[in-house]
Amino acid sequence: MTAHLPVLQVLVPLVCAPFCVLLRSRTAAWLLFLFAALASLTCAVLLAVRVGGDGAQRYEMGGWPAPAGIEFVVGAFNTPVLLVVSAVAVVVAVYSRRSVTSEVDARRVPLLYTCLCLTLAGLLGLTVTGDVFNAFVFLEISSLSTYALVAMGRHRRALLASFRYLVIGTVGATFLLIGIGLAYAVTGTLNMSDLARRVADLGDDGGGNRALYAAVVFVFVGLAVKIAVFPLHAWLPGAYAQAPSAIGAFLSATSTKVAIYVFCRFAFTVFGTTLVFGTMPIDRIGLALACLAMVAGSAVACFQTDLKYLLAWSSIAQIGYILAGISLATTAGVSAGYLHVINHAVLKAALFCAAGLLVLRLGSARFTALAGLGRRMPWTFAAVVIAGLGLVGVPPTAGFASKWALLTALVDQGQWAVVAAVLASSLLAMVYIGRIVEVAWFREPAEPGTGPTASKAPASMVAAIWVLVLASVYFGLDATWPAGLADAAADALLANGGE
Amino acid sequence: MSELLTGWTSPDRALALPVTVAIPLLGIAALLLVRRNPNAREAASLLSGVALVVAVLGLWPVAGDDLRFELWTWLPGLSLEFALEPLGLLFATVAAVLWPVTTVFAAGYLRADGEHAQTRFFSFFALTIAAAMWIALSGNLVTLFIGYEIMTLATWPLVAHKGGADARRGARTYLVVLLTTSVGLLLPAIVWTWLLAGSTEFRPGGLLTGHAGTGVLTVLFALYLFGIGKAALMPVHRWLPAAMVAPTPVSALLHAVAVVKAGVFTVLKVAVYVFGLDTLGESGASRPVMWVAAFTVLAAAVVALRSDNLKRRLAYSTVSQLAYIVLAATLARDVALAGGALHMVTHAVGKITLFLCAGAIYVTAKKTKVSELDGLGRAMPWTFGAFLVATVSIVGLPPAGGMWSKWLLLLGTVDAEQFVMLAVLLVGSVLSLGYLMPITVRAFFRPPHGPLTHGEAHPAIAGPLTLTALGCVALFFAADAVLAPLTGILELP
Amino acid sequence: MIATHYVYWLLFALMMIGLYVVISHGNMLKKLIGLSLFQVGVFLFFISLGKVDGGSAPIVSEDVETYSHPLPQVLILTAIVVGVATLAVGLALAVRIFESYGTVEEDQVLLRDADDREQDGGAS
């Protein structure tokens, strides 16, 4: 049984999906998703323990040996991602029960959970797979179900957001496919380890093979769309803000993070550090775009008047931090990137969950609706402020730990311009979080009639929010555990995948 | 029990340190429990204040024992830890002793003024003191930085306490300036230090000694001194006058004691333990900042001289006096540093007296401007008597503690052969006489504008300020005792 | 170069035509058509990679010596399924958008959204 953990990780949510449709019951669908999430979390934890003990775990699908067969690989480099995705899935599952019923038409709820199961399966599959084409398939599984999830938002604007995401996302995925095709043309293999070996055999600079260079470019542009790297971010704000709240929370915490992991996997273990960051200027481009993302994302967030859009733009900036760490291609930098993947997932999920609670009780997350409610809903706003301070990077929240790690890595490499961008972005983050605080506590309510309408905040939603908030504070006070995972991941990646 | 007692001050795992930090937090829990009854609530505050004083004074006999307590590992290779050293002990004592005094005053003030949200007020007050203890006892730069930021955030609701547009604007400036400097300058400086020295520990003789050249040291020193926005070096002093929108007890404790002293304490600590006085003196890395500090001494004093609003005048006086301490650090001489450390104490006691007097005048006579104070001295002799004593201390005249700190500072400038600085300090003192003395002169010797309808302030208000005024005088006689622990780290004549 | 690899040039031209349609048209159906063109171009490119000179279709038979590479064809079978699914989701979305906005022109939809927001009393 334990030998099959890598495949069970993906299989359980995948199999749960059709049952969600077939059972047609809201409660049954919810229970199935909760079960799928819990099972994934269990698998992820067991796998992490095994990886910690005996190193990378390999699983041959259907008993066909690699490189011909598809292989699942779980190593130190992807266990943090598995843990984050499945843990967030569990929290969102608890949160979603009340949140989804209030925002989505009752008949569509089982369908929503179907898509959620599929998204989870796609993301987990994308993380564990050791085969590049299989990665494309899982990417599309998660993307297609995500488009459907976004379209289930409350406003008709959600449809437009979903359509835009679909067009941009498909172009990105197809770019990835072109890249994979070119890499296949050059090397004749699709297995990641095998590809890595054959690319390495071509020589340090890929033997000057122009098709290989094109492959690298296509793969990275394709992934950049999925990561929402700055100029390719246009789909993100609408998709996150218009999706149902629970979905927004789940996507913001997981989908871009998995794409970032895939980026790392391709950069460090498939094409190789020397080719991607030495011969090709992906590191310099990455750092430049990261700076733009940090500053522009935070700056735009400052001008938003809707909490969800504000959070979505802030995500674009935070992705910049992660990208900056990874683009350094040093152990410290990659480790900082991973640490922020973990911390940002927790913080942003908490914030989107809190925004969802506001939507449930106030009917909107626009600032005009939030004005002056800090005293009436102190716990919800306290959660927003604590997690918000995490985005700024103020101690003792999780954001400080990752900012410390990132600054250390940047200063170590003498990247002072990027340091300045990180700091500027932090200050802008302070401005937008400060705006929320001012609106909530120091502004008069717009009309006397406005205020929390629903009788009480559902306990399940409050619990989910506070679990995330407390986790973020814990990760700020004692960062040894996430930082240990991140360090192990960075070591494994830079030692060529721990293969 | 005996195990607990030996563990209390054992050198490698001294329980006394985390307990000292925890006492104000327990105080918060206690006062929240009894929040329905204002008397019990204030009693809880006061009780934890007294407990804190006892705990901190209990540390004096073991000041030289190099107590440490490791909290936990924060990131691999970086742990959060507390350590006791003389400068921290001084700062902790000042904050701890003045907390219960201010609590009594605050209770009287808030009730007389009918302020809202008093429980919130006392809770964040105690949280600020906890942060001050954390900063005073922190054993490395990262621990200190965490306490520093917690203090910024904990004082923000106090500054914004009154609500309304003015308070909001003041609190915004406060937060923006402090967070901008700490995140933008201090944090990179700490990270850089860590990379240069491989540690963030406070090390006698200087952590950076032998790890960096003069150029890097100069840049780093500037990063630190402007990054520590709480020390209010111009041009990052803007938050201090802005924060004067807070109720007076907040201005008193936070902006005469906890917050600004946390700033200059960090400056002194960085100078001694991160750079090392010898390294600083030889490399001259502190020279550029020294001139900024000198400018701040004079410029802030001139602004104070021209301010009619009493609290604003006191705020700029604080900016000017803080620059004395920063100047002491930049002189990089043992004598000067001892003077700075002593000034941290004497200025705290003196300035809190002045603020308490300002508060007493505001709640009793509803006056906020210097020009309105004519003749008030006859109605409020205790208040203005205390104001006079504190004035004497701040200016640096006998028989008040301020005289010794300024004396040591002057000796320091001579020792460092910085005669321009000697002149700056003297002119600064004359200016301080110019902006503080007229207040008592007006109150006692000018006829009142109209008939006086009030008497002395309520005893809960007049009592604390008399006590702190006595403290100013007591420091004149006890300066040696205050400096005694410092002999462990500094060579004093 | 162009002569020997003319297929690749043609297919990349096809992809670019598809991409251009996606970018240049505001009509959602035309966008989807462009997207499909783009994807089909990529599929054909993959298949052409597996072509071996003189090779026959990879169906085992006794009188054939050389076969074309079968793996790309298998992969593209999967990719075609993905493409069809994407098109289906896209069309479904377009239908929903037409139902709720009465148009599938993106600028029209945006205009009507702006009206929504004015009625809501706040911009987002």
Image: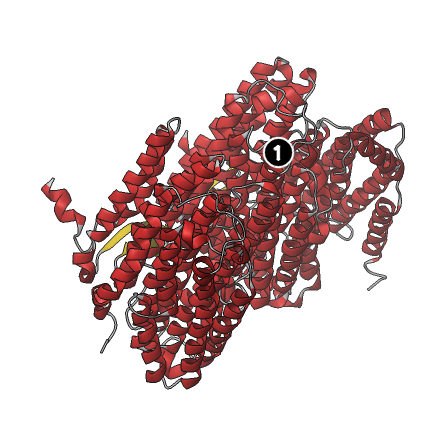
Q: Is residue B273 left or right of residue A171?
A: left
- Residue A261 vs residue B223, the one in the foreground: B223
Residue A7 appearing in the image: no
Residue C10 image position (x, y, % from top left): 86, 53
Under tag 1, what secondary structure?
Answer: loop
Q: In this view, does A447 lie to the left or right of B293?
A: right
Task: Name the residue: 38% across, 49% down.
Answer: B131
- Which quarter of the rendered picture does the C terminus of chain B lie within? bottom left
Residue C2 image position (x, y, % from top left): 84, 62
Up/down of A44 relative to A477, above or below: above
- Image quadrant assignment for residue A445: top right
Up/down of B460 relative to A465, above or below: below
Q: Where does label 1 land, which residue?
A: A372
- Residue B236 vs residue A74, the one in the foreground: B236
Query: Crowding at label 1, few (<14), some or many (≥20) Cα neighbours within 10 Å?
Result: many
- Which quarter of the rendered picture does the N terminus of chain B lie within? top left
Identity of the amino acid at label 1? Gly
Task: Name the residue: 63% across, 39% down.
Answer: A439
Q: In this view, does A170 lie to the left or right of B45?
A: right
- Image quadrant assignment for residue A148: top right
Task: Name the residue: 42% across, 60% down.
Answer: B263
Residue furthest left in the image: B2
Task: Name the residue: 28% across, 60% down.
Answer: B90
Q: In this view, does B164 lie to the left or right of B18?
A: right
- Residue A135 vs residue B382, the one in the foreground: B382
Residue B454 image position (x, y, % from top left): 45, 43
Residue B340 image position (x, y, % from top left): 35, 69
Residue B308 appearing in the image: yes
